Amino acid sequence: MKVAIQGEPGSFSHEAAKKLNAEAEIVPFSLSAEVFTALADGTVEAAVIPIENSLAGSVLEHFDLLLAHDVRVERETLLRIRHNLIALAGSSMDDIDRIFSHPVALAQCRHFLATHPTMKSVAFYDTAGSVKQLVELSDHRAAAIASAAAAHFYGASILQSDIEDNPENFTRFFLVRRNGESVADPESNKISIAFSVENRPGSLVAALAELSAIGTNLTKIESRPVHGKPWEYIFYVDCQIHSAEEGGRALAALKPHCAMVKELGRYREAGKSRE
């Protein structure tokens, strides 16, 4: 199976894709929009995207892309995010004056950066991409913050492991496939839904009350603006369900109160592992 990711080989998305499908052929793209285009046009059979980080919050662009394309979330997984200081083989801590990484990774390592004030942090488009760059440039003064997998993939060395501020750092990833090719999990216990409500008082409360009335446990709600319609919003919710059939009842309960309802996927909830 060809699986698209946003980012370079060795990234956390690459690691999550292999966790979801160990035999997958990983196809990297620079932009998330390119990932969804490749999935839509059949270049790849699936995509693995980060949807939420336990510290940084939701990846909002990916909600918009899920809504805009005819795709379905088939599985999810949680990945423990471990940040490492990576440099060229032979480099030492005293050599480093610049650290490259994705802005979110830099933000999650503030304590380490604060205790090393001579190392200037520089935002880069991708964690693994920052490792790739320093290897290509053979820059012994530069380092990167990325996964251990990135260090191994590009032949770099880990100078210090686990430099993240908070060990409770997990990212939730979705495995996404084209709607007609997605295989439903009969043991699904979670559903993701996008909906918009009529612009009248109490409409959102009424919609959520319907979910509560059928015993569905709402675990997440996110709002996103409707493009071209100021002050109108799409709501994204995750709900725990007792069976795949209960997901259908949740959709039916929402429809009388909503201008639009779209199921994004029914899947099995991922368990948290510290590995």
Image (cartoon, rainbow, N blue to C red):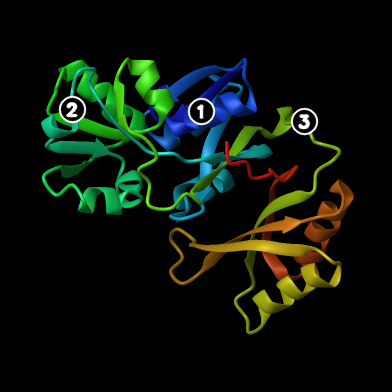
Q: Is there any visible trace of residue 148 in the rendered image?
A: yes
- Residue 156's x, y, as percent? 29, 19
Residue type for callout 3: Val
Give the mark nearest the N terminus, 2 or 1.
Answer: 1
**Mark 2: amino acid:** Ser
Q: Residue 15 carries which label?
A: 1
At mark 2, the secondary structure is: loop
Q: Which mark is residue 183?
A: 3
Eye-nearest disc, 2 or 3: 2
Q: What element carries label 3?
A: loop
The residue depicted at 60 percent of the width and 39 percent of the height is 174
Name which of mark 2 and mark 3 comes first in the sequence.
2
Residue at mark 2 to residue at mark 1: CA–CA distance: 27 Å
Label 1: few (<14), some (14–19) or many (≥20) C-alpha neighbours in 10 Å: some
Residue type marked 1: Glu
Q: Name the residue under label 2.
A: 92
Q: Distance between the residues labelled 2 and 3?
A: 49 Å
Other-residue count near label 3 (Cα within 10 Å), few / some / many at <14 / 14–19 / ≥20: some
- Up the image or down, 156 lies above or below 188; here it is above
Which of label 2 and label 1 is nearer to you? 2
Gap between marks 1 and 3, in whole Å?
22 Å
Mark 1 or mark 3, which is nearer to you? 1
- Image quadrant holding the C terminus, namely top right
Say whether residue 66 is left or right of residue 128: right
Location of residue 194 in the rendering, given as x and y in whole percent from the top left corner: 64, 56
Taking the view exactly as shown, the residue that stands out farthest to the bottom is 201
> Residue at (53%, 50%) from the top-left corner?
63
Percent position of residue 181, x then y: 72, 27
